[in-house]
Amino acid sequence: MFKVIRYTFVLILLASTSTFAQGLAPVTRVDANPDKRPAQELFEDANGYLGRRYQEFNKQKLPFDPKLEAQTKREQKDLAIKNAAILQARSSLNGDDLYYLGMLHHLADNADEALDAMRRMLKDDPRW
């Protein structure tokens, strides 16, 4: 009896944790004028965000600040979420687009969506 209660509690805890984490994702809206940049460029924009910002901080000779670092990483994550939404709004995605979509989801700490995009890429692209 105790095992059943314990397993039930663990299942409820796991289900609520994933639901809670999904609820934290910022809402993104795609503009009326869609972004036409290639998927690779959208990924490189988000992936290079930290480097560009840190270069700016070095030029300004800002001392290290853990709060600024955390904020900058949040901004990168938000950019990755936004760029992933731009890609998902496109009608047809090929293998490379799905790869970069998966990588954007990875940057956004969205493992389930990253895995889904990578699986779609493997299924879609005959090279794999």
Image (cartoon, rainbow, N blue to C red):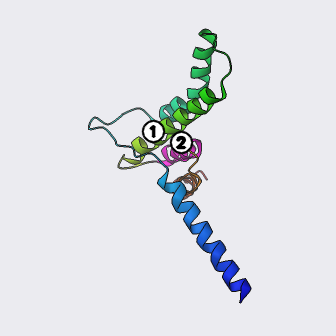
Do we see residue 120 in this rendering?
A: no
Circle on res. 59: none
Do we see residue 15 in this rendering?
A: yes
Q: Quadrant of residue 51?
A: top right
Q: Earlier in the sequence, mark 2 or mark 1?
A: 1
Left or right for 36, reference 14: left
Whether the residues at callouts 2 and 1 have beta carbons within 8 Å, the answer is yes
Q: Disc 1 on helix, strand or loop?
A: helix
Magenta span of residues = 94-107
Q: Quadrant of residue 1?
A: bottom right
Which x, y percent locates residue 62? 63, 14
Left or right for 25, reference 4: left
Residue 18 lies in the magenta-colored region: no
Judged by its main secondary structure, the magenta piece is: helix
Q: Disc 2 on helix, strand or loop?
A: helix
Which x, y percent locates residue 87? 42, 43
Q: Badge 1 is on which residue?
A: 83
Which x, y percent locates residue 103? 57, 43
Residue at the (63%, 79%) spot, across then down? 8
Farthest residue toward the bottom? 1
